[in-house]
Structure formats: structure tokens, C-alpha cells
Image (cartoon, rainbow, N blue to C red):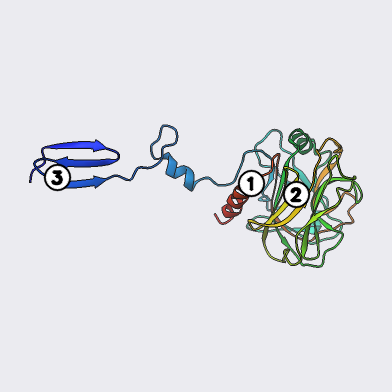
Amino acid sequence: MRAKGVSLRNGAILWFGTAVIGVLVLLLVPTVGQDALSGAAVVQEQGRVTDGLVVLYEFKEGAGQVVSETSGVGQPLNLTISDATGVTWAPGGGVDITGDRVAIRTDGAATKIIDALRASNELTIEAVVTPRDTTHTGPARIVSLSRDTSVRNFTLGQTRSQYIMRLRTSRTDTQGTPETETDRDVLKAERQHVVVTYTAGSVRIYVDGEPKGLGARTGDFSTWDPTFRFLLGNEGTLDRQWHGKIELVAIYSRGLSAEEIKRNFDALAN
């Protein structure tokens, strides 16, 4: 039967005449901004979390002694490899630390990081690493903001098959102890996404998007030393060597949520 009219109501178009001859249901896409289709695009292209990002190192140089800071936030805080013969650049990205007495570090104080984190009194440390083995002790330094083996603002390290976090606050000693650690056998000699957060009185460690360590911690960062370097793979004294591959390191000035950490982990597959 021929339709005599059309009506649009609640997302459905109805043809009607002496009898309804058809119903067409439209799939409505959530609207973001002025583009009615942009909601789907936002879901698909979220990518990595950028809110609160302070520094980002992606290790895509492929050669040389400089690791560029690529966050696009403020002045870049580039790193220098202390001994180029002690590393191997991976073709697809990343640097493999193979030598001893090798540190990847700022040339001076990491003021950009220190000022941002002292202003917020929160942090997130993120790293994509492949430890060479599960025998390192010390703990061996993976990511550190410190002066030497005794005084630090923070250190993420490895002790055998555990990740270790030492965080200095106004309620701890200069070592940042007691440390927060994962269970044994969480750290493996394979590619892992490691995240540490400090917020709301606790230190949390996540590995591959899953919570693996929790420690109570109170206080703020008012006692942090403003002169410390930012280092990867070793201590400033070059006697806490870590061996393995580093593909990404990021620092945020806030504690990422579990959902945001999972989002960054999922982005590694893209």
C-alpha cells in the first residue's frame, strides 16, 4: 500500500497511510562537539593518556648518545647515554643496556620533573622494559631521581624477580623507605609494562595493566632535593647497574587511575 506520510520520532522513521507499511530504525552515534560522527572516532583513537604528562621518552633515535624527550610539554628534557659502547639501539625502537657503568641521564638537575611533581604531590612512573634476567640485586636502578645509593626522591628498581619502589616524602627518610614491592616472580625476563603511582596515601605498582603491589605511604614532596638528576639504568654513582631493554619511559604529575593505566597498556598493541 502506498505511504501517505513520514514521521521522525525517537530515532525511528515511520511511513504511514491507511496502514503502517514499514519501520526503519536508525543507529544513533553519540555526538562529541559539532560532528555527529566524532563520538565513534574518539573511542577508536583515544591512544595514550596525555593529561598530566610531564616527560616522555620513546627511544626511536636508533643511534647516538642522546635520547630525546618527546612529550611536547614545555622545554624538552633530553637524556645523554654516558657510554655509547654499553648500549645497542633496537631497529624497531628502544635501547638495550648491555654494558656496565652505563647510565642514561639528564646533564643536570631534572628541574622540569621535580617542580611539576612537587606542585602536585602525586606521580606516575611508566616504563616499558625487558629485563635481561631475574638475578639483578641492589636494587638495580630502572628509573631513578636521585643523587647516590643513599639519597633519592624516588627509585624504581629490580631485585631478582621483584619490582621495587622507593619514594621519599615528608614522612620518610632520605632513602624513601620502607619500599613497596611486588611479589616474587612478577618480574620476568620478557617485555613488561610497569607503572607506579602515588596518590591518596598509597603507592601502587601495576604490571601489564594488573595491580601487583600496594604500600601505604603518606606525606608530600616538600622534602625533595631540587638538584637531583633523572636517570635510567643506573645510579648516579654508576654502581647499581640494570641490564635490559627500555622502550618507553613517561612521568606524570598525577596518579593515573587503573582504567588509564590499562588504556596505556592496550595502546602498546597499536
Q: How far apart are marks 1 and 2 (CA)?
A: 12 Å
Question: 192 or 201: nearer the eye?
Answer: 201
Task: Decide which of tag 3 and tag 2 comes sooner along the chain.
Answer: 3
Above or below, 5 relative to 141: above
Rendered location of residue 80, percent (x, y): 79, 46
Q: List the residue tagged with mark 3.
A: 20
Q: What element carries label 1?
A: loop
Q: List the residue tagged with mark 2.
A: 203
Above or below, 134 relative to 259: below
Q: Which of marks 1 and 3 is in front?
A: 3
Q: How crowded is mark 1: few (under 14 residues within 10 Å), some or many (20 or more)?
A: few
Which amino acid lies under the numbered mark 3 shown in the image of this protein?
Val
Q: What element carries label 2?
A: strand
Which amino acid lies under the numbered mark 2 shown in the image of this protein?
Val
Question: 69 or 225: nearer the eye?
Answer: 225
Q: List the residue tagged with mark 1.
A: 257
Q: How far apart are marks 3 and 2 (CA)?
A: 63 Å
Q: Is mark 3 on a helix, strand or loop?
A: loop
Question: 146 or 108: nearer the eye?
Answer: 146
Rendered location of residue 98, percent (x, y): 79, 62
Rendered location of residue 217, percent (x, y): 79, 46
Rendered location of residue 222, percent (x, y): 83, 35
Disc assigned to residue 131: none
* Residue occupying image coordinates x 48% and y 48%: 44
Q: Distance between the residues labelled 1 and 3?
A: 51 Å
